[in-house]
């Protein structure tokens, strides 16, 4: 099993992530940057996606050419912060289906509690990209993938903006077969379970809440 962590170090991704980390970045700018970064991350996530050949006609002649098997992709957003990734991903993958997983973190135990789960049908034929900006304790990501595996999808990938060693270890202790894609692996967690140096609460910064 892979236990793979793919660190996406493209200069544009790193530049935009740095702007997102700044505490004086406005809600409007943070949301726009999340959209732009998600477009860039989609390129990396789809690098090994299944393709199919179709026959088309160019202005000069008929030919066989390849397209992504896009109708088989599911973007699974962990609510609510994962929704900050959706528009950008859908701009690149407009034929993808969208699923939602509602989880909240119990402040006492830091464990994930599910309150909503809705996925497309026929998941056995689909490749799932799980969207959540932060891989902190990893408890939400583990719970989401636990639930998704019950639907028996063809493949699973997890993408976040910022991860940390504790979250990666917890996630891969439970799901060593699911690769992680992230632009940054930060130092660790503070006593409240937040990634440091991190970028704060991604959901609050995307939606302008406290």
Image (cartoon, rainbow, N blue to C red):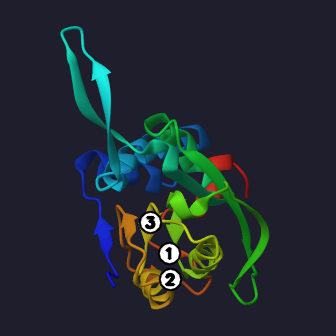
Real-space Cα separation, disc 1 to disc 3, in angstroms? 21 Å
Q: For mark 1, does the 10 Å Cα neighbourhood hold few (<14), some (14 to 19), or many (20 or more) residues? A: many
Residue 151, picture quadrant: bottom right
Is the N terminus in the top left, top right, bottom left or bottom right quadrant? bottom left
Residue in the picture at 51% in, 36% down: 94
Q: Which mark is residue 189?
A: 2
State how far apart marks 2 and 1 are (Cα).
Answer: 5 Å
Mark nearest the camera among 2 and 3 is 3
In the image, 18 versus 60, the foreground residue is 60
Residue 68, compared with residue 10, is above or below; it is above
Q: Is residue 58 left or right of residue 75?
A: left
Which mark, residue 58? Answer: none
Assign a secondary structure to mark 1. strand
Question: Is there CB contact under 8 Å for labels 2 and 1?
Answer: yes
Residue assigned mark 1 = 195
Q: Quadrant of residue 183?
A: bottom left
Decide which of 138, 32 is in the foreground and name it.
138
Disc nearer the start of the sequence (1/3): 3
Q: Position of residue 114 (x, y in %)?
A: 76, 74
Query: In the image, residue 139 lies at what x, y percent?
Result: 60, 82
- Frontmost of labels 1 and 3 is 3
- Residue occupying image coordinates x 49% and y 83%: 171
* Residue 24 in view (yes/no): no
Identify the residue at horizontal 38%, vertical 50% (top origin). 41
**How many other residues sit within 10 Å of disc 2, few (<14), some (14-19) or many (≥20)?**
some
- Residue 147 visible here: yes
Judging from the image, what secondary structure is the residue with disc 2 in?
A: strand
198 or 169: nearer the eye? 169
**Quadrant where the image shows the C terminus:** bottom right
- Give the labeled residue for mark 3: 157
- In the current view of this chain or complex, which residue is farthest to the left? 60
Q: What SS does tag 3 mark?
A: strand
């Amino acid at each position: 099993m892979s236990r793979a962590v793919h660190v996406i170090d493209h200069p544009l991704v790193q530049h935009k992530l740095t702007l997102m980390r700044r505490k004086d970045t406005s809600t409007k700018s943070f949301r726009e940057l999340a959209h732009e970064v998600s477009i860039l991350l989609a390129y990396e996530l789809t690098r090994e996606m299944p393709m199919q050949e179709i026959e088309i006609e160019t202005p000069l002649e008929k030919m066989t050419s390849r397209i992504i098997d896009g109708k088989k992709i599911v973007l699974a957003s962990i609510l609510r912060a994962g929704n900050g990734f959706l528009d950008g991903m859908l701009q690149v993958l407009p034929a993808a289906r969208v699923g939602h997983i509602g989880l909240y973190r119990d402040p006492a135990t830091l464990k994930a509690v599910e309150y909503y789960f809705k996925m497309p049908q026929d998941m056995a034929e689909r490749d799932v990209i799980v969207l959540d900006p932060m891989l902190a304790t990893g408890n939400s990501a583990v719970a989401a993938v636990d639930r998704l595996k019950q639907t028996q999808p063809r493949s699973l990938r997890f993408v976040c903006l910022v991860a940390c060693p504790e979250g990666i270890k917890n996630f891969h202790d439970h799901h060593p077969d699911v690769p992680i894609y992230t632009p940054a692996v930060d130092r660790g967690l503070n006593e409240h379970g937040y990634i440091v140096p991190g970028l704060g609460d991604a959901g609050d910064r995307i939606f302008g809440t406290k």
